[in-house]
Amino acid sequence: MEYIDASVSQGVATLTLRRGKVNALHEPMVEELQETFLSLERDSEVRAVILTGSGKFFSFGFDIPALLSYRQEAFTSFLIKFTDLYSNLYLYPKPTIAAINGHAIAGGCMLALACDYRLMVQSRAKISLNEITFGASIFAGCVEMLRACVGQQYAERILLSGDVYIADEALEMHLVDQIAAGDRLLHDAEILARDFANKDVVAFRSIKRLLRGPVLDSMRAREEGSIQEFSNIWYSESTWKNLQEIIIRA
């Protein structure tokens, strides 16, 4: 794989995002993630999955400079692939742990939200859904996942402010579930993953579907319209100008 390192130990798969310094998401990386998760779903030896990043970033989110070369139709197609990825991850039949090793911004935060459990490093790392700060909108699926995670009041604060949060603040809002020291992040994530993996597979899948199925139904009911609105705002004059000022130092 080109953008993901994958390893399996004692039934737990660890996927490490590895693309430049900030693990920015572009179309090939999204496709590779989708294919990898589907492959692990079919692997009976894998009973839980940890998703983490390399370096100081879990993920910066979208690779905006790369996406600026897209015509709107192609960009909308990319958005469909990305929202399909987090929708599939949200109801993934095996336990998923987001080991947030560094900054998790925008699309990176969405991937973490789609996991069953979020473990964040205690450091200078920040987490945010900051789309509003550069004039972009959000997806209906993200809104539903966030609201199910933190509740309506915190969801409004997070999305309408675009603020960034350190681990302690994210924990207080239930945006993450647990904090770990930097040198223990993966160790603690593996303990959690193995605990989940020891649960009955069929029962886990059934209960997760019962818990998250109604949320996913709400996501899908409004997702298509929100994708088109996101795309239209992205290509609006004011937002397009803001996007061109964003630089990713790979």
Image: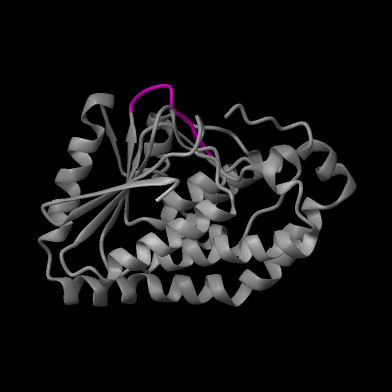
Q: Is residue 16 above or below residue 203?
A: above
Q: Give coordinates of residue 26: x percent, y percent.
A: 58, 49
Q: Main secondary structure of the magenta part?
A: loop
Quadrant of res 189: top left
Q: Give coordinates of residue 219: x percent, y percent.
A: 54, 70
Q: Is residue 196 above or below residue 178?
A: below
Q: Give coordinates of residue 91: x percent, y percent.
A: 37, 69
Q: Is residue 174 left or right of residue 8?
A: right
Q: Quadrant of the C terminus?
A: top right
The number of callouts visible is: 0
Quadrant of res 190: top left
Magenta residues, start to end: 122-128
* Scheme of image coloration: one colour
Q: Is residue 234 left or right of residue 139?
A: right
User: Residue reaching furthest top?
Assistant: 124
In depth, the one of 177 and 52 nearer the eye is 52
The residue at 69%/30% (across/down) is 247
Q: Give coordinates of residue 72: x percent, y percent.
A: 79, 60
Q: Is residue 245 above or below residue 207?
A: above
Is 9 magenta? The answer is no
Quadrant of res 175: top left
The residue at 19%/38% (across/down) is 188
In depth, the one of 107 and 248 nearer the eye is 248
Is 127 magenta? The answer is yes
